[in-house]
Amino acid sequence: MPEPSDRTGEVDGLPVFWRSASVPDGFQADATVPLYLHGVPDNSDEWLPFLARSGGLAPDLPGFGRSGKPGSLRYTIDEYDRFIERFIELVQVPRVSLIMHDWGVVGLAFAQRRPELIERLVLINAVTFLPGYRWHRTARIWRTPGLGELAMGTTSRRLLRLLSRESNATPGPMPEEWLDSVLGHFDQGTQRAILRLYRSSPPEVLEAAGARLGQLQMPALVLWGMKDPYLPARFGGAYADALPRAELIELHDAGHWPWLDRPDAIDSVIGFLGVAAT
């Protein structure tokens, strides 16, 4: 199995951290480098079980993890779209397969703008770039000036354990390793990035960001934990309907991080990318 290593570099002066692992020999001939894009409030740590199987690249997006978190950034969908393009230029890979979870869906904006660079798409409980979505309770708090700042400033391990009890189908809060990873990087820069990202993304902006999904002709996999308290179950099917060549896997006993409830979800992703399950 490929062993992920830590890498650092710069994109337009922004310090960037990423995980890199060699693609194994088991990839099919048409497979390209997997590029994993994490969500909120995560970082590239969430992709370690996938990288160990498929190889590929997993950056900490600007504002998260160990990458730069400058106050000069707006942390918008468009800004992340451009970052992905510049990151691919930095690591010098000609084509990628995008694997996106939660806010990693910013990769769809890039895919619609530069489809010639994308071999395959994987969406895992991704923020909805489709009509009809309304933000969940926590997001509405973050989008409210003053209240969002208060919520960020009072986030503690105890509170995060309590709030995360609803995140997945498996009883209890999220694993301690996840809490360690999130809280270890939940500084003022990340809090600012989260607030700006959510506040720049009302439902009409989200819908507009997916306006050209029907033009994406690469194979796609939509893998959806149906007990997600943040992203309603119907949007997994809606994404599959919007993408012309999509396969849908609905996991009725999984939540927002479906591979934590159903480790075999990793097999499904790896198989789709071109690696035989081991």
Image (cartoon, grey):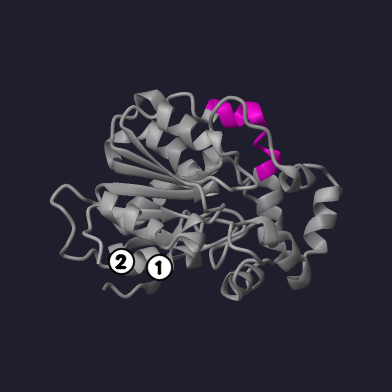
SS type, badge 2: helix
Q: Position of residue 217 (x, y in %)?
A: 29, 29
Question: Magenta residues, as a range?
Answer: 198-208
- For badge 1, the amino acid type reads Pro
Rendered-image quadrant of the C terminus? bottom left
Q: Position of residue 62 (x, y in %)?
A: 55, 56
Q: Nearer the viewer, residue 229 or 34?
A: 229
Quickly name the residue at label 2: 53
- Tell me if 161 is positioned left or right of 93 in this view: right
Quickly name the residue at label 1: 49
**Residue drawn 60% across and 54% down?**
40
Where is 7 relative to 131, above or below? below
Q: Would you say residue 207 sits in the magenta stretch? A: yes
**Residue drawn 75% across and 64% down?**
162
Residue 98: which disc? none
SS type, badge 1: helix
Where is 158 relative to 233, above or below? below
